[in-house]
């Protein structure tokens, strides 16, 4: 029931179902800073390969989650929509890992 | 809950028993399937990485400063999109139209950068047929570029309709669905930018 009210609120344009302009701008700043750090990391000498890859993946994951959660409103939307997106996303990640395993492609570990 | 949902559905043919508009749920289902599509393309690119028999290699050919600008442009277009939706919700059509147009223009800027980048790569000897890197790179980024181009056309259509007075605050959901698609192409680029361009 609460879910229905939340959805009805979304359609009626209720304030609770959306972020504010200030929130959107703050997230934009975070996204910009993270992108700048990502690029800077690439040009910073001496970072071990595994650390570089893990930090780039982590920053990318944070950017991804911020856009999906706040800009796509999935944070405020129905759990049904969340499941519709997150389920296939997990399958997509499984596809990527399966293909990499099939072709012995490692981006984190050095080749034997 | 079921009674409430059924009453809701009886009034609006687009409203399902879950209380979620069919069009919005359809878009999320499509985006989920598109996730798997891009997952397959990204997986293939990463699987072929470093296995090409000849050059040019990614390290030799990528123009990271240009691609970083493209990533920034697409991120900003996502911000413009949420601003457009915000002003539409507030019944401010003037600013809603402005931000829809800005979103489309930034999308077109991204596509322009990609066309320039592709031309540079072809000039330097990398084509779809050159190597495993060439085929997997152009297929992945080309499909993403096609998605962005489709989004630009969609947004420009909304902007034209808004200027003709055929799109207003009552059409919030239509713009929201276009926005969902637009943010999706942005998050796909977030993944491509890191996995294809940045990870050495």
Image (cartoon, grey):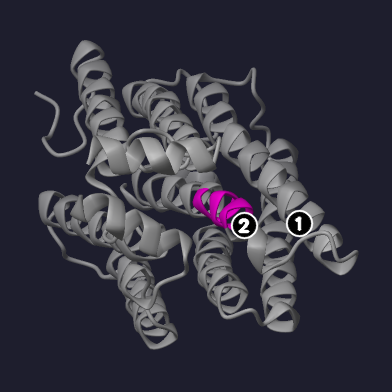
Q: Compared with residue B151, is residue B51 higher up or lower down, i.e. above or below?
A: above
Q: Nearer the viewer, residue B183 or B73?
A: B183
Mark 1 residue crowding within 10 angstroms, few (<14) / some (14–19) / many (20+): many
Which residue lies most toward the top here?
A102
Dominant secondary structure (helix, strand or loop) of the stretch shown in magenta: helix
Label at residue A14: none
Identify the magenta region. Answer: B173-180
Residue A22 in percent (x, y) is at 39, 88
Q: Compared with residue A10, is residue A57 higher up or lower down, i.e. above or below?
A: above
Which sits earlier in the primary sequence, circle 2 or circle 1? Answer: 1
Label at residue B175: 2
Q: Nearer the viewer, residue A69 or B139?
A: A69
- Marks 2 and 1: CB-CB under 8 Å? yes
Res A86 seen here: no
Going 16% across and 63% down the picture, which residue do you hit? A47
Q: On what subunit does the disc labeled 2 rest?
A: B
Residue B61 in percent (x, y) is at 55, 46
Q: Compared with residue A82, is residue B131 higher up or lower down, i.e. above or below?
A: above
Q: Secondary structure at mark 1?
A: helix
Going 25% across and 35% down the picture, which residue do you hit? B2
Mark 2 residue crowding within 10 angstroms, few (<14) / some (14–19) / many (20+): many
Q: Secondary structure at mark 2?
A: helix
């Amino acid at each position: 029931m609460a879910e229905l009210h939340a959805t009805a609120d979304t359609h009626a344009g209720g304030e609770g179902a959306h972020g504010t302009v200030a929130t959107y701008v703050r997230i934009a700043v975070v996204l910009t800073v993270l992108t700048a750090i990502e690029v800077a990391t690439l040009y910073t000498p001496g970072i071990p390969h595994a650390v570089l890859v893990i930090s780039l993946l982590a920053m990318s994951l944070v950017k991804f989650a911020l856009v999906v959660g706040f800009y796509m409103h999935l944070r405020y939307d129905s759990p049904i929509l969340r499941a519709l997106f997150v389920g296939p996303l997990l399958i997509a990640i499984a596809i990527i890992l399966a293909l990499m395993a099939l072709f012995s492609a490692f981006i984190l570990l050095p080749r034997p | 809950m079921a009674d409430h949902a059924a009453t809701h559905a009886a009034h609006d043919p687009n409203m399902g028993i879950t209380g979620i508009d069919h069009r919005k749920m359809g878009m999320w289902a499509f985006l989920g399937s598109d996730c798997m599509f891009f997952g397959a393309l990204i997986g293939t690119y990463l699987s072929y990485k470093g296995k090409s028999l000849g050059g040019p290699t990614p390290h030799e050919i990528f123009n990271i400063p240009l691609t970083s600008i493209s990533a920034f442009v697409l991120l900003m277009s996502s911000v413009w999109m949420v601003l457009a939706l915000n002003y539409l919700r507030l019944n401010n059509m003037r600013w809603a139209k402005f931000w829809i147009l800005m979103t489309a223009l930034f999308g077109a800027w991204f596509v322009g950068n990609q066309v320039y980048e592709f031309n540079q790569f072809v000039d330097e000897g990398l084509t779809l047929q050159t190597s495993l890197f060439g085929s997997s790179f152009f297929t992945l980024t080309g499909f993403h570029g096609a998605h962005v181009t489709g989004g630009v056309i969609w947004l420009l259509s909304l902007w034209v309709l808004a200027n003709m007075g055929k799109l207003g605050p009552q059409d919030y959901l239509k713009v929201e669905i276009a926005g969902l698609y637009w943010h999706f192409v942005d998050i796909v680029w977030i993944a491509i930018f890191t996995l294809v361009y940045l990870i050495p």
